[in-house]
Image (spheres, helix red, strand yellow):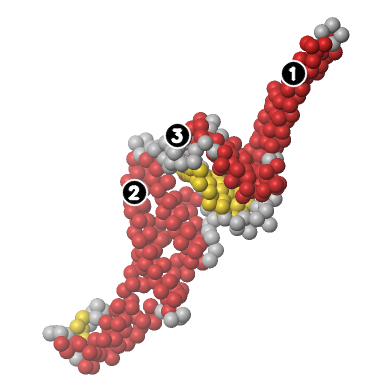
Amino acid sequence: MTRLLPLWTAVRYLFVGAGTAFLSLLALAGLALVAPLCLIGVGLPALPEALHLIRKLVDVERRRAGAFLGEPIPEAYQVLDGPVLKQVGTALGDPATRRDAAWLVVHGFTGMFLGAMAVGLPFSAVNHLLMPLYWWLVPGGVSTGLDFVVDSWSMTPVAIGIGVAYGLLFLLSPRAARWQANLARRLLSPAKGVRLTDRVAELTASRAGALEAHGAELRRIERDLHDGAQARIAAVVMQLGIADQVRGRDPEAAFDLVRKAQDTAIDALAELRDVVRSIYPPVLSDRGLDGAVSALAARCPVPCTLDLSPIGRRPAAIEAAAYFIIAEALTNITKHSAAETASVSLAASHDSLLITVRDDGRGGADGARGTGIVGIQRRADAFDGHADLTSPPGGPTILRVELPCGS
């Protein structure tokens, strides 16, 4: 049974490959229709959409081949955005587009053949091996499909030989599947240096985002201190100064000023504590990320359920980033979503932390409208993580953030 598993895996891979090969031929036919229209400008708006669909098909094959080979196949596409002409120019200049086109041609014409062979060969082998048992029941004999008919006992050894040959060819299915997967890897993998260049660009962008987020955080802290605690402390100094001046003439008024100064100092101390909490919440040190998130959910005006897997302690910077991401997400839900319920999920592996925040609100969340989503993305980028937001009109809104945190 163990020996049959690779054979079954290969047959299944080739059979699915026949389906993607058929879709590849359809994609080629679609490009053949759109390309002439692009020459007169009519087909230009359709070309980026067609390429998006092709990229989705290629991504399916890239994941299939990577799973079969046990090694993921990286992708390196240039982003198609901006005006139509810019998108077309980007697509035509992208080496990945040419790799995709080459894969469509090669896979389209070989994938269907290999898939048909993988499925048809075992049935043909069994049929030919059984022909000696039933050829005499069929009037005029049985056609083998190879331009001869088994209509006598002398022809049965030939049928058996063909059946054995078909069976041996079928046993080569794992090699055919591996050839198809390796072909996908060769055609769809980016050229040497491209992945490194893209990685450098990603790190440069994340570094810029981290610096911008850090600068914004410093400006926020300075503003909070200047407009809050500093102003109150200045008021305390002024009140005490006035009290010192009037204490000889009006001790009762001086006492009132001292009392006001005390109240103002208490308020300033509370604001200083809030600023300190905004830098690194003490609850993280006292109760860990699980306890801190539970406290956030308890304070959220929208009923919030928790799904907290045991995650243990993580680096302080990661815990702080996760805390503020969840806090910002719950604040967005409270202010903008009109949701009735929300949920927060925390899951962890040995090298990453996955945060999922969901609500059943109106949806349509967009970072361009300044709802805190950009800040969440920048916090994730600062740690080389990523944030994905799904928020169709009508909801639900789902925010997924993954933070690398090797332990």
Q: How far apart are marks 1 and 2 (CA)?
A: 78 Å
Element type at mark 1: helix
Q: Residue at x 46, y 54 (%)?
A: 59
- Residue drawn at (35%, 85%), measured in percent from left and top? 164
Which residue appears farthest toward the front when viewing the image? 252
- Give the percent coordinates (x, y) of residue 293: 60, 45
* Pointer 1 with pointer 2, Cβ within 8 A: no
Q: How far apart are marks 3 and 1 (CA)?
A: 41 Å
Q: What residue type is labelled 1?
A: Lys
Disc 3 crowd, CA 10 A, few/some/many (<14, 14-19, 20+): some
Which label belongs to residue 30? 2
The quarter of the image holding the C terminus is bottom right
Say the numbered circle drawn on residue 338.
Answer: 3
Name the kind of residue labelled 3 in the image. Answer: Ala
Q: Is mark 2 on a helix, strand or loop?
A: helix
Task: State the image quarter where residue 108 is shown.
Answer: bottom left
**SS assignment at label 3:** loop
Residue type, label 2: Gly
Q: Which of marks 1 and 2 is nearer the N terminus?
A: 2
The spot of residue 169 in percent (x, y) is 38, 79
Q: Which of marks 3 and 1 is nearer the N terminus?
A: 1
Q: Nearer the viewer, mark 3 or mark 1?
A: 1
